[in-house]
Amino acid sequence: MIAPQENASLRQYNSFGLDVNAEYFAAFSKLDDLRELLEWRKRKKLDLLLLGGGSNVLFKGDKSGLVLRNELMGINLVGEDARSYVLESGAGVVWHDLVMHCVKENMAGLENLSLIPGSVGASPMQNIGAYGVEIEQVFEYLDALHLESGEVHRFSHADCQFGYRESVFKRTLKGEYCIVKVAFRLQKEASLKTSYGAIQEELERLGGELNIAKVSQAVINIRQSKLPDPKLIGNAGSFFKNPVVSMEEYAQIKENHPNLVAYPSGEGMKLAAGWLIDQAGWKGHDRGAYGVHDKQALVLVNRGGATGEKLFALSADIIADIEQKFGVRLEREVNMID
Ligand code: FAD
Ligand code: EPU
C-alpha cells in the first residue's frame, strides 16, 4: 500500500497558499490504491478529506485525519455519432488541460470554461460555470467510488441534481463518494456562446476567424485581466455565490440602489455579489497579509502569511455588512475545512 505521509504540508495543495499540515497525506493514481487507503483509514478511524487541485477550499487550520489527493489520469474517446463525441476523463486530470485537449481536437462545448483552476473530478461538485456555460450543459455521466463499500456507481445527469454551484454531492451525498471519472458530450459543430459579459468585445479586439480556439482565448484574456493568478496571490476565485432573490426583494433593493447589477434566474433575479461588496466599499480592502482583491470584490486574497481563521473572519464581516446594507445574506461558495 502507498504509505501515507505524516504531518505533511498542504501549502502547495491549496490555492489560498495557506501554511497548513495534514495529519496524514497520500496521493493515489489507481482505484485499487484508493480502496487500500480507505481500508487503512477505516481501521485507524480517521476523518477523510478528498482533494483535487485545492482551488475551492479554505483550511481553517491543520487538518486532522487523512487527506487524499486524486491523481487518476487519462482522457479517452469512448463514443461518437454523426454530431458528437463522448469523452471520458480521469478525475485527477487538470481541468484546463481537458479544455485545451478539446480545443485542439475541435470538440466543442468546454471552451467558455477555459482556465478554471482545479481538477476534472471536482467539476461536477459545484457544477462549475463561467461566461454563460455550466458543465451540466455538456455533462454525460460520472463514475464515483462509494467510500463505505468501495463499489463504483454510475451517476446520470438527473442523478447529480445540478443547480447553480450545486450538486447532490454537496447536499444529500456529501462525504459519501469519490468521483473517479467524468464523461462529457462534445459537439462536432460548435454553437458558440459569445453573448456573456465582455466576450464579444474581446473577440472583436482579437479579430480573425471565429472558432472555439478564439472563444477560449477571449475567455482566457478576460479572466487574466481580473482574476488573480493563485501562483502569485493566494485565492479561491469567487468566495461567495451570487445570491438569487425573489422579484419582490429585487424591486425593493433596486428602489434604493438603481444601479444594482442583476440577471433573471428562474422565478427570481441573481444579484452580482461582486457589485454589492464593491458598493459597500470592500474592494481592495487591506488587512495586511490578506484582504479583498482590488479588481474583483468577490475574491478574497492571501497576500502572504494569512491564516484560514482570519480569512474566515473577514468573510463573516463582509456577510454581516452586506446584510445590514442591502438586506441580502451572502452564502460562501468556497468549501470551509475545519
Ligand atoms: P478542490 O478545491 O480540491 O475541492 C473542492 C471540493 O470538492 C472539496 O469539498 C473536495 O473535498 C471535493 N472534491 C474534490 N475532488 C473530489 C472528488 N474527486 N470526489 C469527491 N469530492 C471531491 N469555479 C467556477 O465554477 N467558475 C469559475 O469561473 C471559477 N474561477 C476560479 C478562479 C480562480 C482563480 C480560482 C482559484 C478558483 C475558481 N473557481 C471557479 C473555483 C474552482 O476552480 C472550482 O470549484 C474547481 O472545480 C475546484 O476544483 P479542485 O480540484 O481544485 O477542487
Ligand atoms: N462587479 C462590480 N465590482 C466588482 C466585481 C463585479 O461592480 O468588484 C460587477 C461587474 O461589473 C459585473 C457584475 O458585477 O457587472 C458581474 O461580475 P463578473 O462578470 O466579474 O462575474 P461575477 O458574477 O463576479 C461570476 C462567477 C465566476 C465566473 C464569472 C464569469 C459566481 C459566484 N462567480 O462572477 O466564477 O468566472 O461569473 O462567468 O457565480 C468562481 O466561481 O470562483 C468564479 C470565479
Image (cartoon, helix red, strand yellow):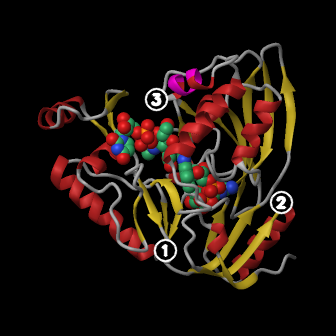
Residue under circle 1? 338
Residue located at (67% from left, 59% from top): 52
Q: Determine the CA span between mark 2 and mark 3.
A: 41 Å
Tell which circle, 2 or 1, labels the residue nearer the N-terminal end: 2
Number of the front mark, 3 or 1: 3
Amino acid carrying label 1: it is Asp
Q: Residues in magenta?
A: 200-204
Magenta: main secondary structure equals helix
- The answer to whether mark 3 is within 8 Å of ligand 2 is yes
User: 297 or 63: which is nearer to us?
Assistant: 297
Q: Determine the CA span between mark 2 and mark 1.
A: 27 Å
Number of the front mark, 2 or 3: 3
Residue under circle 2? 31
Residue under circle 3? 197
Amino acid carrying label 3: it is Gly
Residue located at (64% from left, 75% from top): 10
User: 259 or 137: which is nearer to us?
Assistant: 259
Residue located at (77% from left, 80% from top): 4
Tell which circle, 2 or 3, labels the residue nearer the N-terminal end: 2
- Which quadrant of the structure image shows residue 101? top right
Image quarter (top left, top right, bottom left or bottom right) of the N terminus: bottom right
Q: Element type at marker 1?
A: loop
- 220 above or below 29? above
User: 136 or 215: which is nearer to us?
Assistant: 215
Q: Within 10 angstroms of label 1, few (less than 14), some, or many (20 or more) residues?
A: few
Amino acid carrying label 2: it is Leu
- Residue 166 in the image, given as x and y percentages of width and height: 50, 45
Q: Quadrant of ligand 2?
A: top left
- Residue 275 in the image, given as x and y percentages of width and height: 31, 43
